[in-house]
Image (tube, rainbow, N blue to C red):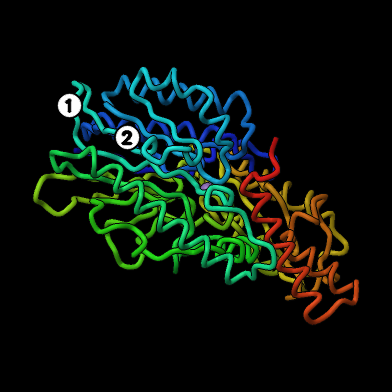
Amino acid sequence: MKFLHTADWHLGRRLHGQDLADEHEAALNAILSLIREHRIDALVHAGDVFDTGTPPQSALRQYYSFLTRAVQAGCGTIIITGGNHDSPAALNAPRDLLEAMNIHVVGGATDDIADEVIAIKSTTGETLGYCCAVPFLRDKDLRYSLPGESDTERSQRLVAGIREHYEKVVAAAQTLNADGLPIIATGHLFAQGGITGDLDNKEQIHVGNLGQIGADAFPESLAYVALGHLHRPQVVGKRDWVRYSGSPVALDFSERDDQKQVVIVECLPDQPVGIEIVPLPTFRRLVRFSGTLAETENTLTAFDSSIYPLPVFAEVQLSPDAKTSTLDINEHFRTLTGKHHGERMQILRVVQARAVGSLSAFHDNTDAALEEFSRTEVFAEKLKKSGLEGEAADELRSTFTELLTLLDEGAFAA
Ligand SMILES: [Mn+2]
């Protein structure tokens, strides 16, 4: 059996007001070509199909159009699992209809864990293996926080819950698997030692650290574990068969230098699993020019924008000491870009980096200054102003983090 592992499409994503639909379409077309060329039996999506729980119509159209074309391209089975960005209910809504085309959707944890086991079938209906299609597991799927629970206790409880979930779902797959066919699994989670790629974003790392699990949480009987959540491709705990495919397109500036890819996996009886990394072209280059005013002007004008199929999206990040007071800085860089790159490059924003740890040093050149700060940073600043310190402040901070996690997991969504 041969399957293609992808994740974190985030269809409908906007970056500083700009649509990423064109690079999404290019990446989806590249995946369709791979399905044809490599005669892929199954497509496995490890979560975050959409960027939000209420994606725009255009993103829905892109998704359904892709699914139809993937079936036409000869993909026998398609497995879609929900990520933390997806709404389980929205993803599940067309489930019965899609199942008629051998497209299986697991938007959120199922009441009966056996419903997460999907038979991977060829176009001729032959069963080739099984997939434990585990979606993003929300706190409520693993039992809600207990009163008075510390961060560490909560994290340990989450890890234990996730391990148990995998043990159970793999056992359910094994009871179906009389012929000893390969069993694979998906997951949408933060694995220990993972690199977020978003190294600028401390909040994401912090929230992600709650409930981190090790590669040993996945039973050895699995042939492969297809992970989503981290946008940078990587192996977990040096286990070649536990991997993040990463996102197929760069979704923000922190991913600007990542080589995007998909993974093609072949499971043959009595043979080690075959893993082929297939790099994807950079359809749209995201680039950040940083430094003093003169440095950013120089690197921006010297940049070769002609080699990418779609217009380059650029961000200018001026150093804290850059002298800009006499300029309309946005206008200045837009004019410069127009002159040197024409339609080949678009400046999405110009920001001035802050001196570390100080909100007041931030020089406001954008209309979205607050966007520069993570929610945790804003809360920390508010806490500082309130004068609260020590244990009382720690407790508020940990409650805030817990709220953020629940919010991101959609606990308060209608
Ligand atoms: Mn994601």
Residue 97 percent across, percent down from the top left: 44, 17
Question: Which quarter of the rendered picture does the N terminus lie within?
Answer: top left
With 101 as the anchor, is 222 left or right in this view?
Answer: left
SS class of the residue under badge 2?
strand
Residue 307 in view (yes/no): no
Give the vertical position of 214 relative to 185 (above or below).
below
Count residues near mark 1 (Cα–Cα under 10 Å), then give few for <14, some for 14-19, many for 20+. Answer: few
Foreground residue, 382 or 59? Answer: 382
Give the vertical position of 84 relative to 287 (above or below).
above
Marker count (numbered): 2
Residue 250 percent across, percent down from the top left: 51, 48
Residue sitting at x 9%, y 50%: 270
Earlier sequence position, callout 2 versus callout 1 = 2
Residue 395 percent across, percent down from the top left: 75, 72
Residue sitting at x 56%, y 46%: 84
Residue sitting at x 52%, y 60%: 158
With 153 as the anchor, is 64 left or right in this view?
Answer: left
Query: Which residue in the protein does label 1 denote?
Result: 126
Query: Which residue in the protein does label 2 denote?
Result: 118
